[in-house]
Amino acid sequence: MRSMNAEQVATLRALLAPTGWLDRTSAFAHALRRSVRTPSGLLIIGPAEEEPWHMAAHLDDESRYAGIPELAPTLVRWAPEPGAPPHLSVGLSRLAAATPEETLLVVSRGVAPERLLERVHDVRRSGATIFALDEDDPDLDGLAHESLRVSPGTAPISFDAAQHLVTAAAGDKSGPGRLGTGIQRPAGPGGEQTGRADRSMRARLARLLDAVSGTSDE
């Protein structure tokens, strides 16, 4: 996934403003930020085949830029390589040590494998708060206290773009519904009008999202 610059983020926000998706990503991001109460208390994990290192890096950037140390994530890995740097060497034992003051963010593009669900279940039993960013996974969403579902074929944004919007909003102190853009946004994402907007936005967003996700040759 290519890095998304400020101009791309601003363009994406402007195009998405009528669809309600800025509200969804902003509300999810600000709930995530509010849930984290201690430094190093935000854990992030995904399937072993697609660890969310890119989102972890962007959250770490936002933590530093916004001066919110609690937002700096700890990337939990399934099998860290021997000699890996500290930020890439945290293994599954960290989940076993999770406390009620901590938050686990699960980022899963496809259906979460059973072994990931088992780990999430154990962390929830410890009292930690669970957030899920996924592509409409009922089992994972059922374990999460808060979830953001980016359903393929219906959402006007890609899963990669959703990660960028969430991380940008998490570090934005202007509050949900603002994002510092000055855009007047609708109150909610539901309804027939929003559904038509979602569909019309897809064609306009296609080229931008291809560039962001790295699928375009441009």
Image: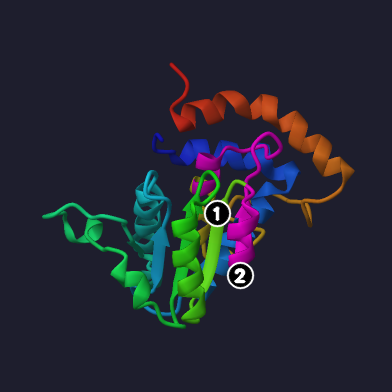
Residue 80 position, x and y percent, is 23, 55
Q: Is residue 25 above or below residue 97?
A: above
Q: Is residue 203 above or below residue 157?
A: above
Q: Residue at x 60, y 46 (%)?
A: 135
The answer to whether residue 171 is seen in the rendering is: no
The answer to whether residue 198 is seen in the rendering is: yes
Magenta highlight range: 136-163
Residue 179 position, x and y percent, is 58, 55
Q: Quadrant of the N terminus?
A: top left
- The image quadrant that residue 200 belongs to is top right
Q: Residue at x 16, y 54 (%)?
A: 84
Residue 202 position, x and y percent, is 68, 30
- The kind of residue on which mark 1 rests is Leu
Task: Give the residue furthest to the front.
Answer: 114
As helix, strand or loop, the secondary structure at mark 1 comes to: strand
Task: Give the residue furthest to the right.
Answer: 192
Q: Residue at x 67, y 26 (%)?
A: 204
As helix, strand or loop, the secondary structure at mark 2 comes to: loop
Q: CA distance from mark 2 to mark 1?
A: 11 Å
Q: Is residue 122 magenta?
A: no
Q: Quadrant of the C terminus?
A: top left
Q: What label does residue 145 carry, if any?
A: 2
Q: Is residue 137 magenta?
A: yes
Label 2 close to label 1 by CB (< 8 Å): no
- The kind of residue on which mark 2 rests is His
Residue linked to disc 1:
133
